[in-house]
Image (cartoon, rainbow, N blue to C red):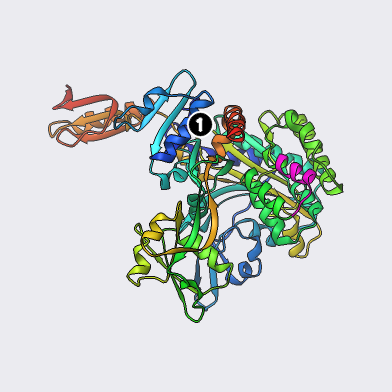
């Protein structure tokens, strides 16, 4: 286990894009793209092991050392604040965290603002910086419904194109923070596998600069 | 004496105590609680703000110790240098709940000199070696980060934000903020290099030298280089790396910072450094340096052969003569084997070897 670099990738489109980056810097693992239910893939020749994890869990695998490095969205890092190194902005999976709602919904400053979100920590920090009294309503998905059924005044969520918002009569009201995928590392793994991780990082940095 | 049944953490406690005693550190045994007021007054020196409290019989608000160092410093009133070690449980909030955490650590309090600091660094390295396996001791100095941040001329809050990015080795975030705060390009490059710098002490030393900008950073590097030199003379330094991103709370630590890692464990097992500010707070002029090893983490390290519960399983039935059974047990135990005695109808445990006694003799 120890001489392999263990890499946690988020299941889904972002993970596939991230794998493509690793492939281009010489850490291919051909059977990873085969359609099957396997979750762990090794390449003996270049001593790497990939595994697919639920995107919100990648940081946990890395923080606890089950993976040495991982690819995770900045939204997850801001929300979970894991104790890991954030080594590189991979420049993929770009989107933004934004406040959205019906037009003018955030202008009623005379009462507590009800905020529905999957990211309570981010929302709390954002409104704390404005000293605004809010009430957080933690939801697990389909956040856009909340203002439509009067569950909340606004939502704090990831906005890619704004299409879903528009179709539901909502609009972006304020940007909270730009989001993209980050390369993170476990603090102990970074030390014991420093040369290998550093050389990966070096190549990855050059590749990202090209793109 | 070999004690093969000991867990890694239990074994480590005994060998660390032996190590500290060998260098003349005295054991310091303390009570489980202090008055809450004591921690409330020194809150800025505690790692976690949550304290487990209760009322004692006379109604005073007491706290289960969240930290050992504070109590040691308060009570180490002797003149001259005090060299103490401890093996205590502390109570801290981890995530959403309180945890009991066992710590073994040592403190050197008094008019510190270069040797005294280096001796503590040496004992930190020896502690890691004693626990076993591959290890790394990282060294840093608060003066490096603080000195570079001084040059930015930014207010405290922004400096703290930059320091946070350095401790994450988050160079993208660091550059973005430097850009926004109009930090000069040269200083931005230095801060970024400071965050990235990592490797064996001697190998990365020239790169560290090149980052120095003022008296604060010069002083920090000089202290580190002297400490490393003595560490070498004491026989250490083989697995010592430089890392200025080490998260040293800048109000707590005032000089050298250490962090120790053992292969196979996801977090630092050893943390420490020089903390003169706490002594000044308590009205003493001297310095103090120390470290603590978090024993709970060591449970995770493999110990012995986990595939068997015992060496020998002795099974007997109703017909077995007690004298035969006792004789067998005595013989096996004298050979130093671990054993478990059960009746034949009971569920067996896993063992290297099984002996079944039926009737008057061995089957």
Residue nearest the observer in this picture, B5 or B199 = B199
Q: Mostly what secondary structure, the magenta segment? A: helix
Task: Return the x and y of residue B340 as percentages of the image width and height.
Answer: 28, 34
Task: Return the x and y of residue A57 as percentages of the image width and height.
Answer: 41, 46
Task: Return the x and y of residue B251 as percentages of the image width and height.
Answer: 71, 58
Residue nearest the observer in this picture, B221 or A73 = A73
Query: Is residue B257 toward the left or the right of residue A207 in the image?
Result: right
Residue nearest the observer in this picture, A149 or B133 = A149
Q: Which residues make up the magenta segment?
A: B182-193
- Residue A175 in sight here: yes
B345 is within the stretch colored magenta: no
Q: Secondary structure at mark 1?
A: helix
Q: Residue at x 75, y 55 (%)?
A: B276
Badge 1 local density, few (<14 within 10 Å), some, or many (20+)?
some
From the viewer's perspective, is residue A185 above or below residue A103?
above
| Chain of the residue where label 1 is placed in the rendered structure | A
Q: Residue at x 72, y 32 (%)?
A: B201
* Number of marks: 1
B191 is within the stretch colored magenta: yes
From the viewer's perspective, is residue A177 above or below residue B23?
below
Task: Return the x and y of residue A72 as percentages of the image width and height.
Answer: 48, 43
Residue nearest the observer in this picture, B212 or B26 = B212
Q: Residue at x 54, y 29 (%)?
A: B133
Query: Is residue A58 toward the left or the right of residue B327 in the image?
Result: right
Question: Residue A90 sits in which quadrant?
Answer: top right
According to the picture, the residue beneath numbered tag 1 turns out to be A21
| Residue at the right extreme, as displayed | B215
């Amino acid at each position: 286990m120890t001489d392999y670099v263990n890499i946690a990738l988020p299941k889904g489109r972002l993970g596939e894009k991230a794998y493509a980056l690793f492939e281009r810097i010489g850490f291919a693992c051909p059977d990873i793209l085969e359609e099957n239910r396997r979750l762990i893939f090794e390449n003996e020749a270049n001593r790497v092991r990939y595994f697919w994890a639920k995107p919100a869990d990648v940081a946990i695998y890395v923080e606890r050392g089950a993976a040495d490095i991982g690819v995770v969205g900045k939204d997850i890092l801001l929300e979970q604040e894991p104790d890991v190194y954030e080594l590189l902005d991979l420049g993929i999976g770009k989107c933004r965290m934004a406040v959205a709602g019906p037009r003018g919904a955030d202008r009623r400053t005379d009462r507590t603002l009800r905020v529905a979100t999957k990211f309570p920590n981010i929302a709390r920090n954002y409104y704390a910086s404005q000293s605004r009294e809010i009430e957080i309503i933690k939801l697990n998905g389909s956040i856009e419904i909340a203002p439509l059924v009067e569950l909340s005044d606004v939502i704090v969520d990831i906005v890619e194109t704004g299409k879903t918002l528009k179709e539901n009569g909502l609009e972006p009201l304020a940007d909270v923070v730009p989001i993209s995928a980050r390369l993170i590392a476990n603090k102990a793994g970074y030390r014991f596998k420093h040369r290998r991780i550093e050389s990966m990082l070096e190549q990855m940095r050059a590749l990202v600069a090209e793109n | 004496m070999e004690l093969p049944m000991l867990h890694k953490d239990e074994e480590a406690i005994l060998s660390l105590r032996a190590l500290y005693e060998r260098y003349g550190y005295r054991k310091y045994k303390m009570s489980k609680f202090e008055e809450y007021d004591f921690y409330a007054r020194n809150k800025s020196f505690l790692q976690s703000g949550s304290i487990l409290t209760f009322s004692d019989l006379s109604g005073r608000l007491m706290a289960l110790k969240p930290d050992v160092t504070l109590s040691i410093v308060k009570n180490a009133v002797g003149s001259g240098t005090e060299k103490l070690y401890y093996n205590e449980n502390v109570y801290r909030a981890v995530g959403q709940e309180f945890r009991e955490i066992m710590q073994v650590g040592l403190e050197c309090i008094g008019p510190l000199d270069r040797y005294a600091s280096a001796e503590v660094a040496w004992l930190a390295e020896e502690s890691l070696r004693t626990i076993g396996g591959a290890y790394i001791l990282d060294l840093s100095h608060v003066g490096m980060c603080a000195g570079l941040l001084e040059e930015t001329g930014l207010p405290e809050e922004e400096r703290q934000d930059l320091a946070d990015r350095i401790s994450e080795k988050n160079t993208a975030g660091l550059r973005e903020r430097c850009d926004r705060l109009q930090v000069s390009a040269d200083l931005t490059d230095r801060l970024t290099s400071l965050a990235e710098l990592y490797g064996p002490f001697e190998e990365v030393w020239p790169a560290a030298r090149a980052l120095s900008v003022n008296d604060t950073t010069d002083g920090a590097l000089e202290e580190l280089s002297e400490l490393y030199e003595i560490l070498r003379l004491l026989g250490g330094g083989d697995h010592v790396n430089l890392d200025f991103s080490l998260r040293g709370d800048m109000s707590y630590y005032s000089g050298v910072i250490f962090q120790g890692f053992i292969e196979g464990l996801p977090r630092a097992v050893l943390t420490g450094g020089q903390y003169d500010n706490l002594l000044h707070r308590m009205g003493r002029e001297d310095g103090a340096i120390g470290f603590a090893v978090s024993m709970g983490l060591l449970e995770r390290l493999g110990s012995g052969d986990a595939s068997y519960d015992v060496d020998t399983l002795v099974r007997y039935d109703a017909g077995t003569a007690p004298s035969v059974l006792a004789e067998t047990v005595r013989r096996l135990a004298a050979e130093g084997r671990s054993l478990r005695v059960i009746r034949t109808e009971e569920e067996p445990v896993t063992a290297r070897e099984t002996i079944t006694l039926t009737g008057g003799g061995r089957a």
